[in-house]
Image (cartoon, grey):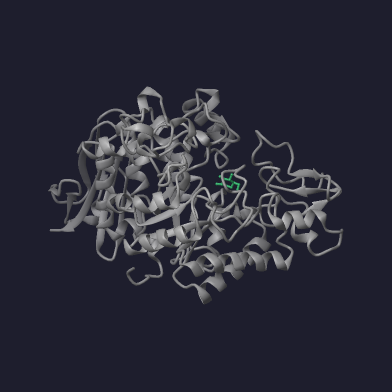
Amino acid sequence: MSARSADWYKDAVIYEVRVRSFFDANDDGKGDLRGLTSKLDYLKDLGVTALWLLPICPSPMRDDGYDISDYRNVHPDVGTLEDFRIMLDAAHERGMRVIMELVLNHTSDQHPWFQRARSAQRGHPDRDWYVWSDDPKRYKGARVVFKDFEKSNWTWDEQAGAHYWHRFYHHQPDLNFDHPTVREAMLAVVDHWFGLGVDGLRLDAVPYLYEREGTDCENLPETHEFLRQLRARVDALWPGRMLLAEANQWPEDAVKYFGKGDECHMAFHFPLMPRLFMAMRLEERRPITEILARTPDIPTNCQWALFLRNHDELTLEMVTADERDYLWKEYAKDPQARLNMGIRRRLAPLLDNDRRRIELMSSLLFSLPGTPVLYYGDEIGMGDDLNLGDRNGVRTPMQWTPGPNAGFSSVDASKLLLPLVGDPAYHWQTVNVSVQHANESSLLHWTRRLLHLRARHPAFGRGSTVFVDAGTYHALAFVREHEGDRVLVVCNLSRYTRPLTLDLARWKGAVPVELFGRVKFPPIKGGGYPLTLGPRGFCWFALETA
Ligand code: BGC
């Protein structure tokens, strides 16, 4: 693999992949690491530069592997540690990085640590690996995250004779980060995966590591202190590796996960995501520009991770109550689509399978400041299945071909881990990689072109951002610039064709060159630059010197 550039994550295009749903190489109905390895060329060709693997460690799978029972191994369903090494080498040979999950807040209740803790005497250090209480009213300031499934963050354990603390499902007891041995154990897990050659770790549910009375038990100073220790260790032992915070928080709290450039390298921008959907529906730019204006600057060695959809529900925690009502009304008309505080749908169904809106949203994902994270299947516009429970409807098998089981597996269809999407609008016989590969006008080809265009302009990953007045709130326009590389992005969020007048005086003399067709536009003479965009149209220009 090419020499490690320390901040590779700034130029990355991350592909989020559920290994179990991607490709089944041993025909047992479940996707596996060997299957993923065999599809790396597809991802490389698409323009992906980093993979983010959903959980692959041994687990009873009651929360899709976020309930870990062994941090150092691979679940037999997806293969072996050797299969993992082979996949990692194959990815590195192709210049692709690999990001894994670090589920540090909690374990499965089946983890030997919990089994040991629940049978240990009170006061014994083994017991203190988890958070126990006789009083289930402690920490009442902490919200219940999975509110459709859990009533409390405490669950009674008969064997221990006490309640234990959990921020998610009751079968996922929270580790006690006040216990030094727990912190050491987690650092050893980090060493294990970085030692194997993994390039990055996504810190799952990181705001919840500590509990303190009188607080909401999120973003506590102790959490940031632990992250600084973790980062110091990564810098000392594993330079060039990356930590990505999953902190579903308001911008001012989320930026704290970067610290002073001495905590995480990356953090997801959760509040931006629902506002992109809001801007689409309202047909105006304000939800986007307002949240970005509210987002503090970040240290120069850090980067936001941007996303439209992922393996979870479209969370509406980081919007106001009115905004939430609006988004629920507009995007989750079917009550079945609602889950916890969000909407359990994929990108294409959320956008009514409207190609223009899908392209417009993707153009934003790939041009706004940050590193884009693409959810598997969204490059072909896969649908979802609301009949499946929890978030499984957005985790169905990747659709490769119009053949049996969509080319995902050769097993008998009844043995597939999850059924294929059979909804006629998104049926796997028409929405699949091979059909779209053969059609140059397909979403797959379009997405690939977008990724390749982005790769040619470092300004997208690294550039400064200046918003440009376009004469109407229906349009969003901005210039990204990095070391002489300048790109102008213009979007018409409205359903109608719109004449725009862009205030490009600052770039007087530059020539906009449209990136898809390399078509030269008239030079910028100063003042208002006229441009007309069709319904939900967008343009990416390079601003070249005349
Ligand atoms: C993951 C979820 C998971 C939860 C508990 C998250 O934030 O993204 O899929 O259920 O953590 O581990």
Find residue 126 and report its image quarter. bottom right
Where residue 519 appears, as percent x and y from the top left, is: 13, 47
The N terminus - image quarter: bottom left
In this picture, residue 196 sits left or right of residue 166: left
Looking at the picture, tell me which residue is in the foreground, 189 or 241: 189
Residue 222, compared with residue 466, is above or below; it is: below
Where residue 194 appears, as percent x and y from the top left, is: 50, 67
At x 64% / y 66%, what residue is drawn?
Answer: 226
Find residue 228 and report its image quarter. bottom right
Residue closest to the far bottom: 236
- Badge count: 0
Looking at the picture, tell me which residue is in the foreground, 260 or 403: 403
At x 41% / y 26%, what residue is drawn?
Answer: 422
Where residue 403 appears, as percent x and y from the top left, is: 32, 33
Find residue 252 and report its image quarter. bottom right
In this picture, residue 426 sits left or right of residue 164: left
At x 38% / y 35%, what residue is drawn?
Answer: 284
Whether residue 386 is visible? yes
Where residue 59 appears, as percent x and y from the top left, is: 60, 49
In this picture, residue 327 sits left or right of residue 160: left
In this picture, residue 199 sits left or right of residue 463: right
The C terminus - image quarter: bottom left
Looking at the picture, tell me which residue is in the foreground, 487 or 301: 301
Looking at the picture, tell me which residue is in the foreground, 385 or 497: 385
Whether residue 384 is visible? no
